[in-house]
Image: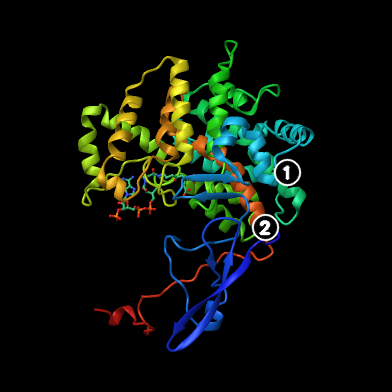
Amino acid sequence: METKTKQTGIAKLEIDGTVFELPILSGTEGPDVVDVSKLYATAGVFTLDPGFTSTGSCESQITFINGEEGILLHRGYPIDQLAGNSGFLEVSYLLLNGELPTQTKFTSFANDITQHTLIHTQMDRFFDGFRRDSHPMAMLTGAVGALSAFYPGAMDSSDPDERYLAYIRLIAKMPTLAARIYKYTIGQPFVDPQNDLSYAANFLRMCFAITAEPYKTNPILARAMDKIFILHADHEQNASTSTVRLAGSSGAHPYAAVAAGVASLWGPSHGGANEACLNMLRQIGDVSEIPEYVRRAKDKNDPFRLMGFGHRVYKNYDPRATVMQKTAEEVLGELGIDTPVLRVARELEKIALEDDYFIEKKLYPNVDFYSGIILDAMGFPTEMFTVLFALARTVGWCAQLNEMIEDPTQRIGRPRQIYTGPATRDFIPISERS
Ligand code: SDX
């Protein structure tokens, strides 16, 4: 990746009377950055920013979020346009390659994915090692890490062709792994991919077809599934993507780096929020209970938070939530479901958005607020929700990992710290300790 930052100014930092000059760099959109990479070498001090609230880890040309305006761009294209006019595999090509594909390039890319959807037959036995009631994310974390054991070929991250093959295998096999994990938890036989189906339709069939009877995919649900994958594909330097970049910066191969991303995504503050949000909506149960839960969410002494609300970057409506809400209404309308959780979600969103606490702290629904309602209506158990998030985010992880590997300025990630532990002291033999 060739850098496209421009130096547009100088920041002056005075320490003990000495002024240090730091370059100010500008990108295409968003805040300028102060380049502190030479700060320690010139001033002998580190910066400290535990949650990276003000710190960029890299230059990237893949995704841009304007949190104040609620804007999300993938390679410059607004998410609502991609969700409304494109498909997940086309968006995957865009994220990986930087441009929307011509028909010829798309056909070749889609064929590459199709040719790699099957998994090694011995990998099917891998699942037998898990208890049937294992959390699906526990199985996915293990299965993705195990891919390198079954596909030892594409392991050299420094080789572009091997990297591409690893990305294709990961994107192609995630739906097969996710469907097998679901089938394993319900004790049904695995259903293999079918090459004449679209990516999303193939996934739905592998999950919901039973070998005893024919299965017909509902095109509305397949389109909704594809749209949900688009909405989860990439999102700048979020926790799991930063995990993938850091893991990959050591030279760890793509399967290992993506397995680290799966593990990070599992957390309830991150990708686990869709599962936690639906559980919360069920716990609330009825619109009459909403005021008590909103009170609890505002109580500093109560650890309860409104899952599916708030975001590190968005201080406005998450544009993905807008598309997700519309998709939820479409899917539930198509299925003729008027689930109580949808009524609770609509009312909770209305109350929260009018509440001073949420307005003052700029807490809006995020991508996880409505996704669980759709997935629940489609028949997925709550524990599978984050697996689907990981399935979709795999292409974003691969695109970001590749950008990091191809960035000439990137080195092994190794943050520093401020140390506040004991100063140097001598060892005391146990016989002399009190
Ligand atoms: C995802 O980074 C990404 O891009 C992630 C993601 C992606 O696509 O990769 O978008 C996917 O992870 C979406 C977020 C899903 N998580 C949730 O829905 C869990 C609930 N949300 C919160 O835990 C929280 O909002 C975070 C984790 C999402 C963001 O946390 P921050 O940026 O560290 O904000 P914070 O915790 O410092 O909160 C700021 C204030 C705090 O109050 P004060 O200490 O200032 O008094 O807002 C409060 C918080 O207590 N607050 C909430 C709240 N979220 C924040 N209060 C009640 N309910 C909430 N949901």
**Left or right placement of residue 415 versus residue 396 in this view:** left
Identify the amino acid type marked 1: Leu
- The furthest residue to the bottom: 17
Q: Is residue 288 visible?
A: yes
How far apart marks 1 and 2 lie (CA) works out to 15 Å
Residue occupied by mark 2: 405
Residue 373: numbered disc: none
Q: Quadrant of the C terminus?
A: bottom left
Q: Residues within 10 Å of mark 2 (few under 14, many from 20)?
A: many
Label 1 vs label 2, nearer the camera: 2
Residue appearing at x 55%, y 19% in the figure: 220
Q: What residue type is labelled 2?
A: Ile
Residue 144 image position (x, y, % from top left): 58, 42
Image vertical order of residue 109 relative to residue 60, above or below: above
Quarter-of-image position of residue 135 = top left
Which residue sits at x=64%, y=57%?
Answer: 404
73 left or right of 138? Answer: right
The residue at the far top in this view is 213
Q: Is residue 131 visible?
A: no
Q: Where is residue 245 in the image (x, y as percent from the top left)?
A: 58, 56
User: At numbered mark 2, what does the secondary structure look like: helix, strand or loop?
Assistant: helix
Q: In this view, does 282 lie above or below 217?
A: below
Q: In this orientation, which residue lies closer to the viewer: 206 or 51?
A: 51
**Residue 313, horizontal then vertical, whole percent:** 44, 51
- Circle 1 residue: 165
Depth check, front residue: 175 or 305 = 305
Residue 123, image x, y percentages:
62, 35
| Label 1 lies in ligand 1 vicinity (Cβ under 8 Å) | no
Work out whether 32 lies above or below 143: below
Name the secondary structure under disc 1. Answer: helix
